[in-house]
Image (cartoon, coloured by chain):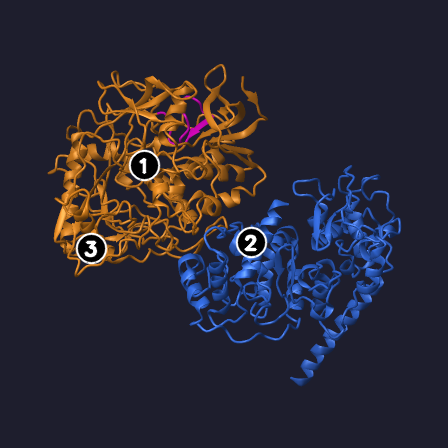
Chain colours: A blue, B orange
Amino acid sequence: MRSRAGLACGALGLVAVFASLAWARQESTQIDPQDFTLIQRGRYLTLLADCAACHTEKGGAPFAGGRPIETPFGVVAAPNITPDLETGIGGWSDEEFLAALREGKAPSGAPLYPAMPYPYYAKFTREDGLAIRAYLNTVAPVRNAVVANRLPFPLDIRQGMTAWNALYFTPGRFAPNPSKSAEWNRGAYLVEGAGHCGACHTPKTQLGGDETSHAFQGYALQGWFAPNITNDMTSGLGSWSLDDIVSYLRTGHNATSAATGIMGEEVAMSTSHFNDADLRAVAVYLKDLAGPAPSGAPLAASDPRMAAGAAIYKDTCAACHADDGKGVAMLFPALAGSPNVLSADPATLIRVLLEGAESVATDAEPTGPVMPSFSWRLDDAQAAAVLTYIRNAWGSSAAPVDEAAVKSARQSLAARKAE
Amino acid sequence: MARKLPRKDVAIVGLGWTGSILAHELTDAGLDVIAIERGPWRDTSTDLSVNYLQDELRYRIRHDLFVRPAQTTFTFRNKMDQTALPIRTWGAFMPPNGVGGGGVHWNAETWRFLPSDFVLKTHLTQRYGEAFLPPDMTIQDWGVTYDDLEPHYDQFEYLCGTSGAAGNLKGQILDGGNPFEGPRSRHYPTPPQPQPFSHTLFAKAARELGYKPFPQPSGNLSQAYKNPLGVRLGPCTYCGFCEWFGCGNYSKASPQTTILPVLLRKSNFSARTECEVTRINLDGSGKRATGVTFVDTSGEEWEQPADLVILAAYTVFNVQLLLLSGIGKPYDPQTNEGVIGRNFTHQTISDAVGFFDRTKFNFNPFISSGAIGMCIDEFNGDNFDHGPHGFVGGGYMGQVQTNGRPIETTPVPPDTPRWGARWKSAVRDNYLSTVKPGTGVHGSFYSYRDIYLDLDPTYRDRFGRPLMRMTIDFHDNEIKQNAFLTDKFAEIIQAMGANLVTKEYRKAPYDVTKYQTTHLCGGAIMGTNPSDSALNRYLQSWDVPNLFVMGASAFPQNAGYNPTGTLAALAFWSAEAIRTQYLKNPGPLVHA
């Protein structure tokens, strides 16, 4: 037995070595931009990288740009990346395209804002980058001049980004970890690179750079909290199996959870189109990410917030989410043990209760069940109580939700709608 | 002058159950389909929200989900020598409105008709002789058989996830199900709903009297279900806000919870809501539909050209559009000729209410769902010998308590004052200990020469079109049938241990202000002969072969069951004929 195990390790090691050789070789490969397989690979890569999420306006021509992207510093509009010569990128050389994709540099030499996730796309191999370029060359050119930069002074001065890059941008391609499997390395390439999961799920510094020491442990953006996607048991994916992760990314749903908001869009436009091997690789990598330390003991059932919350839950929530908080698989998300419910930052939780949530509908799971808004029915104290309850019922524990937090979320969500 | 829209392969009038089924089937066949719906779009979360759908005043009393009589109504009379007057508030039935149609507000009682129901005229004549039937009764065979429809009943039940117990599996009679049902090819997709106390007590009493009670087939699901289209429904929570209300829990089968999520993802489907179709357009020959004309909320008139027109509105509106478009010969009761408007029917409903000792019985009537119930079928159709009784027809009966809602559920014994302190205390004393079925006796309504639909000579709608006129009354046959069934039903309620049972017989004249059911049937019936039916056995117009007419308007007479299962099975049957026969060779599928 011992020798067979040793052999297996050796074989895995070999695979990793081959993989790293393959990565290295790809950097220098000459490519034919008219090659069908290359163009199709590029199309798949644009799905992995979800280019359309920013570069295609809702209902607009593919990749013609113009969609405003909300950042903590202001709004940036995604440019036109169709092959139109004047307003798109048809006039760019391949090297200029690669520099924009992987280094955040426009052909003029001006730095791009990191709303373009080049710190992640830096991991792209040259061949993958050129495959994307080859595919984008085949989409219909659209004449659409986009004013990308709508940031206030002094952020509208792009040269500021040079300093930012010095602080937060690590150039360099993906380097496989030879001690891990090829599947793990593929997952790492997708999660850290093309998938740019950290753009939402990794906490940011004051200047918007990744807090790499807390990678993937969750981050508040656009009025949501993108939850911890490490393997942490409490607020991360620790309780999810590989299949749970694959089902969630493929269909938007699994036995306990449903994608909504930005993640619902991500599933619909990107992850539902991943092939099975890639989804599995993503799951394998995420399950190997270490998470933060677990939190403390649950609030006592006798706590007045818990008593009020339990009563509100019974009246208002239990019909769908069930008395035991387990919901209905693939239809009504489980609240018991849910990473979203137990997130350190309850922004998503408060928002879903106040605004309701439309879960994503996919070809595999077309139902797309929707939770209605409860904002008019529950006041701040009631909302806080029921949220505190679901964070501390069924053996879970998480910090109580303050009435003040609900109040301020109500105001900021109203402001968001008014914009 | 109507503005003309780009041509479509198929225009569907109405996006309820049958419109949704046809849209799904025909888009699957690759056709470009548009559905035109008079009412608003309706979604579970935004329009049927758990936050407010339990509003009895809004939905039950003020009829929120239904057509507003100000938009359109019908005129009504009992007898041909009376002058019909417009209905100004709905009473005996509730014309649906909006996407999902009656599928939004139904109780989801999902029955199959008996095999003999489809060959009714032949069956009754053979068993009892022609002379046994009233001379003015105009019942007919359907032109389809139970065996034709069985695969499509099955299709609908599996679409909905219907909860029930099989009573006849491929000819084998099973305990616990309805032993009188036609043979079914497989079990119900989900087990029966667990029954509340009064239902269980009814079943026990019925069994002791020698009957074979069974759970009513229910579209309020006993458990979570994924249908063959991949759409999911949740388990019913027994909230008791089902009929007249939409379901906020995704647990009542409706177009919204079974078909629309898939339909909306198809690029060859589109829908226009709040657009009222005013006419089906014909070419110069009058033998071919060229599309439909509709009016939007701005009063703008549009023409939608289409190769195939599917009429899928509510019974009376189907008949009205045929008459206003000049399709088929209008029925004339004097000469008994013509087909559009003939064999109009409804349902014969009655009740028996049991008052029990409140110190011993607590029924918690609010624990309920639209279709939950224990029923018997011994007195339905021709399941019993009618010879000694002098009438034909029948119905199922059962403890089908659909709700305990506060405004409606105020059972008080006879001789209680109608208001005041004594009334209040009587309501308090009896609320929990009274058995008051929503549908106790659910009887058939057979067709007669003098019950029909035609265009009103006086009253017009907002477009200047004549309103539909209903001429409808109960005949002696139905009154006798109801008296017999109500007495049998009351015996069971009595045997449950009631202190007092009151019987609420259905009596003539037909009262348009008292709710019975929304099961208006007939007026554009299917059959074997163009001289006495509007449609052939595939629901295809005899006169205009590129027009198919869905719905209960095709029923030659109404059986003692809720009609939705049958009208949905007919829709699947018709869709199959369109897909496998009509599209290959567009033209009449039956040559008269």
Q: Quadrant of the N terminus of chain B?
A: top right
Sequence-earlier tag: 1 or 3 = 3
Q: Which residue is mark 3?
A: B433
| Residue situated in front as seen by the camera: B225 or A296 | A296
Residue B188 as seen in the image, left or right of residue A406:
left
**Which chain letter goes with mark 1?**
B
Asked whether residue B538 is drawn in magenta, I would say: yes
Query: How far is disc 3 from disc 2 in space, using C-alphas?
Result: 46 Å
Q: Nearer the viewer, mark 3 or mark 2?
A: 2
Q: How many marks?
A: 3
Task: Say whether marks 1 and 2 touch (CB < 8 Å).
Answer: no
Q: Nearer the viewer, mark 1 or mark 3?
A: 3
Residue at far left of view: B388
Q: Amino acid at mark 3?
A: Ser
Residue B444: which quarter of the image? top left
| Residue situated in front as seen by the camera: B439 or B530 | B439
| Residue situated in front as seen by the camera: B565 or B300 | B300
Which residue shows up at 23% across the image and 31% down it?
A: B511
Q: Which residue is mark 1?
A: B518
Query: How far is disc 1 from disc 2 in space, using C-alphas?
Result: 44 Å
Circle 1 — which element? Answer: loop
Which residue shows up at 43% across the image and 66% down it?
A: A324
Whole-percent x and y of residue B391? 15, 35
- Circle 1: is it few (<14), some (14-19), or many (20+) Cα within 10 Å? many
Residue extent of the magenta highlight = B534-549
Residue A398: which quarter of the image? bottom right
Whole-percent x and y of residue B235? 40, 56
Mark on residue A410?
2
Q: Quadrant of the C terminus of chain B?
A: top left
Task: Say whether marks 1 and 3 touch (CB < 8 Å).
Answer: no
Which residue shows up at 56% across the image and 50% down it?
A: A361
**Which chain letter goes with mark 2?**
A
